[in-house]
Image (spheres, rainbow, N blue to C red):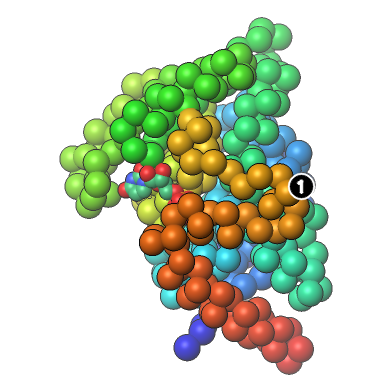
Amino acid sequence: MLSLIQTPPSSLNRPSETSAAKAHERTRLFGIEIDPLTMSQAVSRVLDWVKEAPTKCQIVVTPNVDHIVQLQTNSGLQQAYRQAGLVLADGWPVVTAAGWLGKPLPERVPGSDLVPAIFQAAPTRGTGTGEASKLRVFLLGAAPGVADRAASKIHAQWPGVEVVGTYSPPLGFEKSAAECDEILARIDAVQPEVLVLGLGAPKQELWAAKFQDRLTARVALCVGATIDFLAGEKKRAPRWMQSLKLEWLHRMLSEPKRLAKRYWHDACVFPKVVWTEFCQRSAR
Ligand code: UDP
């Protein structure tokens, strides 16, 4: 049974003191609030937060079809989304369905494109003092060694970015208070501006939300396999597949055991979510 989530707009976590918070109304869809931003607006928003140092770490989530399906029943993920400062539509089905439902979103902002775009834009940010400073980044997640390989590639490609720490937490880390304390201490010790969380969904969103008050990074990006992509550990779909909207097929074929069942389930449930939303809108 599908139940669309009720999210009071007043519960949104948006830092009133930052210029980044002024810009736009969120779009309410599928029981969540989505920020209708372009990639370049999202990059500016993140770099504004880096510059302005909001009082609380700002969580960025990127809903795809799987998130929307999980959000129908996962109250912890619903709460994490309510705590997010930015909710960016990752998948083209989400953007397409939004258009059908009369709530157009300007474009997809996939997490795995957002991170390189932030790195690319980082050197042009103002520091307030006129000095050039590197963007301080911590990579949390992926298999042992992968984040270090990603760090080397990041340093080679984006000299304006400094990876100040990496960590691959052991399996089941999220259930151990001591391990979570250890991770928070590692992050705190190097004071990154941006925390890249590559732990898969919903683990990364739940973890960031649970420890939001203790995260000393200014922004936490929940971006799935992005660390793998940056390291070259996993390959993004070729451009032609992306332009034919077949990136999902590429990912499924690269990890069929893990993803085929999930994609099948999502393909069955997501149209029902869209239909429910359509009926609710028509009834209003
Ligand atoms: N991962 C991790 N720790 C965990 C679970 C997953 O570091 O406890 C990493 C995994 O190594 C991979 C990423 O999370 O790098 C999974 O990203 P993906 O986007 O494939 O996850 P999804 O959200 O699709 O499950």
Residue lying at 76% horizontally and 47% vertically, measured from the top left: 38
Percent x, y for residue 56? Answer: 49, 39
Farthest residue in the top direction?
A: 131
Residue lying at 51% horizontally and 57% vertically, measured from the top left: 253
Percent x, y for residue 205? Answer: 44, 52
**Number of numbered discs on residues:** 1
Asked if residue 52 shows in the view, the reply is no
For the residue pair 259 and 98, the one nearer the viewer reads as 259
Q: Is residue 210 left or right of residue 229?
A: left
Residue lying at 27% horizontally and 49% vertically, measured from the top left: 174
Q: Is residue 90 left or right of residue 182?
A: right
Percent x, y for residue 235? Answer: 54, 41
Q: Residues within 10 Å of mark 1 (few under 14, many from 20)?
A: some
Position of 6 relative to 125 (above/below): below
Image quarter of residue 98: bottom right
Percent x, y for residue 263? Answer: 50, 68
Question: Does ligand 1 reach within 8 Å of label 1's beta carbon?
Answer: no
Position of 241 relative to 115 (above/below): below
For the residue pair 17 and 57, the one nearer the viewer reads as 57
Asked if residue 155 shows in the view, the reply is yes
Position of 261 relative to 149 (above/below): below
Q: Is residue 269 left or right of residue 177?
A: right
User: The residue under label 1 is which amino acid type?
Assistant: Thr
State the residue position of label 1.
38
Q: Secondary structure at mark 1?
A: loop
Quadrant of the rendering where the C terminus is positioned: bottom right
Residue lying at 50% horizontally and 33% vertically, measured from the top left: 232
For the residue pair 59 and 69, the one nearer the viewer reads as 69
